[in-house]
Image (spheres, grey):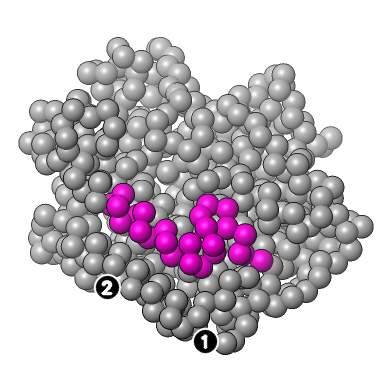
Amino acid sequence: MSRLILGPFNRVEGDLEVQLEVTDGRVTEARVNAPMFRGFELILNGRDPMDALSIAPRICGICSVSQSVAAAKALADASGVVVPPNGMHAINLMLACENFADHLTHFYLFFMPDFTRAVYAARPWFREAERRFAALAGSTSNGGLRSRAALAARARWFELIGTLGGKWPHTGAVLPGGTSRAIETTERIRLLARVREMRAFLEQTLFGTALEEVATLDSLAALQRWRARAAGSDMALFLDLAEATQLTNLGPGPGRYLSYGAYARFEGGHALARGVWDAALQQGLPLDPTQISEDARHAWYAESTSAQALHPMAGLTQPEPDKPGAYSWNKAPRLGSQVVETGAIARQLVDGQPLIRAAVLAHGGTVYTRVLARLLEMARILPLMEQWLLALQPHAPFHAVQAQPEQAQGIGLTEAARGALGHWLRIENGRIAHYQIVAPTSWNFSPRDAAGTPGALEAALVGARLDNAIEGAGGQSVAVQHIVRSFDPCMVCTVH
C-alpha cells in the first residue's frame, strides 16, 4: 500500500488537498482536506444585521449572488418581509444567470479539458477533444475552439447581472425585501435579447437542437435517439467520451440527494422542487431542516461539551488548529445523521426530471450522471429566465421596506450552482449574535464524522484507478481528477 497526497488542484476555486491510500493501483481510502480557514462567521458577529449583505457575498467571487440571496433570505425570515413578484423575478434572474454561467464554465473550462491530457493521446477521439476543449493557457495544440467561444459567450452573458444588479461579482442589489434595481420596459427587451443570444449559442454548439428538446428528454432510449440526431454537438461528444472512458461507473455517490429548492415562486414553492431523493428506495422525501447538523469531530474546530453534532442555529466556529485527529477546516454536515450529495443532480432528481432519474437508476450518481444533470439543467434554466423576464410588470414595485427587529432569528436556504446553500442567523439587541453557513461543497467534500463515516467525495474516490502514465509524476490520476471535478468544488465557500 502507498500513500499519495494530491493538491492543490488546478481549475478549483480555493485550496483542496486529497490524501489517498492506494493498493494495487486503486484507491482504497481517501481523506479530503480543506486546508484554509477564513472566519467569515466570526467577522459577522456583533455587526448590524444588514452588514451581512455586504460581507457574506465576499466569501466567493463565483457564487456571490447565491451568498447574497441566502443572506437576504435569512434577514427576510427574521423580519417577516414579503418580497413583491417583480423583486422575486429579478432575484431569480440574477441567481439563474450566475448558476447558468457556473455550469457553462464547468463544462468548457473545468471538466472537458481533462480529456485532452496526454494519458488519452492514443484514443481515436483525442484530436477532436483537443480541437474543441484544450486548455486555453499552456497548450501547444492551438485548440480549444469551443472553449474560447463559450468564454466569449459567458462574458456577454454577465451583462445581464450588470443591468439587473449593477455589477458582478458582489452586486449590492439583493435585499431582504426584493431588489434595489427596478427594470424598465426598454431594459427588459435588451435583457431578453441577451438571453436569446445565449440560447442561440447553446442550440448551435452545446446541444445542436432546441433547448426544449433536451429539457424534455425522458429516458435513456430517448437520450440515445437524441444523440444520433445531434451528433457533432458538444453534449453528444461528451456522451461519446463518457462511454469510451467508462465515466458511467466512476465516482459513485451516497445515493441520497438534497435540494433546498431553486428559484422561489411568489405563489409559494420553487421552480425546481425542495426535498430529498433516496435512490435506493426510488422515493422522494420531504426536507426537514431541523435534521441538519454539522459534526466537528475531524475538523479543526472545538466541539460542543456534549461532543454531539450541532444544528447550525446552535453551531460553533471556534478554531482549534492543534486538535488531535482533525484533518480539515471543513465540518461534516449531515441530514438525519446521513451523508447526502447536493448539486444539479440532486435538484433534477428531487424535481422528478425523468431522464436523470432513469440515468441514476441505471448507473448511480457517478461522474457521468453529475455532468449530464448539469447540462440538462442548463437547458431548463434558460427558458425559465425568458418566462421571468416576460412576467416583470412595468411600474410595479421591486422592493418592500421593513426594518430589522431587535431580537429575531432567521434561516436562508437557496441553491447555488454547486448545490444546497444555507445561512442561519440570530439577532440580539439589534446586532448579529450568531451566524453559521453551510455551503454546497461543505456537504460534498465533508470529512469523516464521529462515526467514522466518510463524506460523499471521500467515498466516491474509493476504487478509482491511478493511470500508470502519470502515477510517477505525483499521482495526478486523471480518474481522480474526473471524480473531484464532477462535484465542481468551491473550497473558499467551504471554509468561509
Query: Against 341, is 129 above or below?
Result: above
In the figure, residue 140 lies in which quadrant? top left
Q: Is residue 14 left or right of residue 51?
A: left
Residue 411 at x, y percent in the picture: 70, 60
Q: Which numbered disc covers residue 393?
A: 1
Q: Image point 65% across, 76% down: which residue?
A: 399
Q: Image point 49% across, 30% down: which residue?
A: 16
Residue 31 at x, y percent in the picture: 51, 27
Residue 431 at x, y percent in the picture: 86, 54
Look at the image and tell me in which quarter the C terminus lies.
top right
Q: Is residue 428 left or right of residue 396?
A: right
Q: Which numbered disc covers residue 418?
A: none
Q: Which element is circle 1 on?
A: loop
Q: Which numbered disc covers residue 212?
A: 2
Seen from the viewer's position, the closer of residues 385 and 155 is 155
Farthest residue toward the right?
Answer: 429
Q: What whole-number distance in Å separates the C-alpha atoms at marks 2 and 1? A: 26 Å
Q: Image point 50% across, 80% down: which residue?
A: 184
Q: Image point 46% across, 54% down: which residue?
A: 417
Seen from the viewer's position, the closer of residues 297 and 267 is 267
Residue type beneath disc 2: Glu
- Crowd rating for badge 2 (residues with CA inside 10 Å; few <14, some 14–19, many 20+): few
Query: Against 433, is 166 above or below?
Result: below
- Crowd rating for badge 1 (residues with CA inside 10 Å; few <14, some 14–19, many 20+): some
Number of numbered discs: 2
Specify start and end residues of the magenta stretch as a single range.
150-175
Farthest residue toward the front?
Answer: 186
Q: Residue 473: within the magenta? A: no
Q: Is residue 39 left or right of residue 252?
A: right
